[in-house]
């Protein structure tokens, strides 16, 4: 999935989320292995305890104490302004505790918070698919067209003859650009409507292949690709650990991963509208999510999405533990001329908003 433009309208309150997060649940897997290092990199919220993990199991979450009465506003792990269970159980809010009392589809209860988040995330992206096809194909997102696309292509460099995976390809615009540069490209996305749009789009530059798949369960053999690109993907993964493990599996030894995402050190609610406050340590060192409905060039998204941020040490440690070496870290930003001559950039880029990582598979 691609990242929406960051020009949001009245985003919901920023919320902290528990660090036991749901990538594997997208495939109904509940027993995938997790390394112990994840516990060190994701400090817990109050009210949650992670038991030491055996090698073959994921860390288990358990409630440490009962929440206070919702009316008091003093529940463990609750931010100021979160006053009831409905607010805590909002999609993307990962309520404290391991279960949600809600039903989907055939009426069976959703018992796992991670599974509930995965299901609702999927519904949101399907609801937003036509919106993002329009935004991307009409080139309405200036963050992409004037800044981050160029940063991605510069990091990719010459790619003629390379086998490339566009992970979270959205409607396929980057895949089409790379085929035009001579790459052999496969694009995957978890949203079927975006994959349909990518597959149906005329591609005079060359024909990329598109398939519906999530990035923690890629339908490719080991060592298939020379390069994997993740363009505005990782802010939509509540926990990218399994995704990085899968990406490492399908990359050849020496292959590169190029990852562009929101800047975890500086992006806060309302950043693109001038908010300049720092990220408090209590939030920065935990995975955190921002629920928001976006406004791009006058177009509002039908459904809100959650943008997930996690500390730099998470990226460094998880990349290391999944077989990567970080080769470069860049922070795409407007030039002095863009900032001087265009008030849109002066208003829309008040702080560092993007991070680009280049990593090599050992």
Image (cartoon, helix red, strand yellow):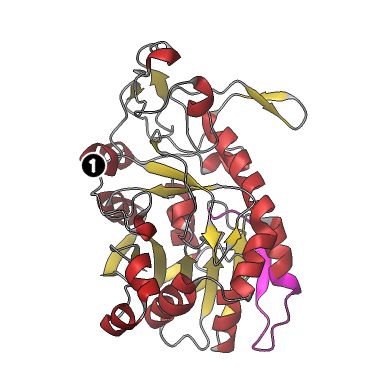
Please, is residue 278 above or below residue 186 in the view?
Answer: above
Q: Residue at x 66, y 68 (%)?
A: 134
Q: Residue furthest front?
A: 343
Magenta stretch contains residue 202? yes
- What type of secondary structure mainly makes up the magenta span? loop
Q: Position of residue 244 (x, y in %)?
A: 43, 55
Image vertical order of residue 140 relative to residue 18, above or below = below
The percent position of residue 238, horizontal first and vertical second, equals 46, 44
Viewed as shown, does residue 235 lie left or right of 173? left
Q: Quadrant of residue 287?
A: top left
* Above or below: residue 114 compared with residue 332: above
| Element class at badge 1 | loop
Residue 2 percent across, percent down from the top left: 54, 62
Up/down of 36 relative to 131, above or below: above
Residue 297 highlighted magenta (yes or no): no
Q: Residue at x 33, y 41 (%)?
A: 38
Q: In front: 124, or 55? A: 124
Name the residue located 47 percent from the left edge and 85 percent from the top edge: 159
Instruction: Specify start and end residues of the magenta stretch as a single range.
Output: 198-215
Residue under numbered circle 1: 280
Locate the N terminus by quadrant: bottom right
Q: Which residue does the image show at 38% across and 14% down from the upper left?
A: 72
Of 132 and 339, nearer the camera is: 339
The mark tally for this picture is 1
Q: Left or right: 189 with respect to 347?
A: right
Can residue 259 be seen in the rendering of this structure? yes
Residue closer to the observer: 30 or 137: 137
> Percent from the top left, x then y, of residue 193?
72, 59
Split into 4 quadrants, where in the image is the C terminus? bottom left
* 62, 235: nearer the viewer: 235
Q: Is residue 212 visible?
A: no
């Amino acid at each position: 999935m691609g990242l929406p433009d960051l020009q949001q309208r009245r985003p919901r309150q920023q919320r902290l989320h528990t660090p036991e997060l749901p990538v594997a649940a997208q495939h109904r897997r509940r027993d995938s292995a997790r390394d112990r290092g994840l516990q060190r990199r994701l400090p817990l919220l109050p009210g949650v305890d992670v038991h030491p993990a055996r090698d073959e199991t994921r860390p288990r979450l358990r409630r440490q104490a009962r929440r206070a009465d919702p009316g008091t506003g003093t529940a463990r792990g609750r931010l100021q302004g979160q006053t009831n269970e409905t607010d805590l159980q909002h999609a993307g809010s990962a309520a404290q505790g391991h279960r949600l009392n809600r039903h989907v589809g055939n009426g069976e209860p959703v018992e796992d918070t991670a599974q509930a988040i995965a299901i609702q995330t999927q519904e949101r992206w399907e609801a937003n698919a036509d919106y993002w096809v329009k935004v991307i194909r009409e080139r309405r997102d200036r963050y992409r067209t004037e800044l981050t696309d160029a940063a991605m292509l510069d990091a990719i460099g010459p790619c003629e003859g390379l086998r490339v995976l566009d992970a979270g390809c959205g409607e396929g615009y980057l895949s089409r650009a790379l085929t035009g540069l001579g790459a052999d490209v496969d694009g995957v996305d978890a949203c079927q409507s975006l994959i349909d749009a990518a597959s149906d789009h005329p591609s005079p530059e060359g024909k990329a292949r598109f398939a519906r798949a999530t990035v923690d369960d890629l339908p490719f053999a080991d060592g298939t690709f020379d390069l994997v690109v993740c363009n505005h993907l990782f802010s939509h993964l509540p926990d990218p650990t399994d995704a990085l493990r899968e990406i490492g599996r399908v990359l050849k030894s020496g292959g590169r991963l190029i990852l562009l995402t929101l800047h975890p050190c500086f992006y806060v609610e309302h950043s693109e509208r001038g908010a300049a406050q720092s990220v408090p340590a209590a939030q920065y060192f935990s995975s955190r999510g921002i629920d928001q409905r976006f406004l791009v060039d006058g177009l509002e998204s039908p459904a809100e999405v959650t943008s997930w941020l996690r500390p730099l040490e998470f990226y460094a440690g998880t990349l290391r533990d999944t077989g990567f070496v970080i080769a470069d870290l860049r922070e795409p930003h407007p030039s002095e001329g863009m900032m001087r001559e265009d008030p849109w950039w002066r208003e829309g880029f008040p702080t560092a908003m993007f991070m680009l990582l280049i990593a090599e598979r050992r």
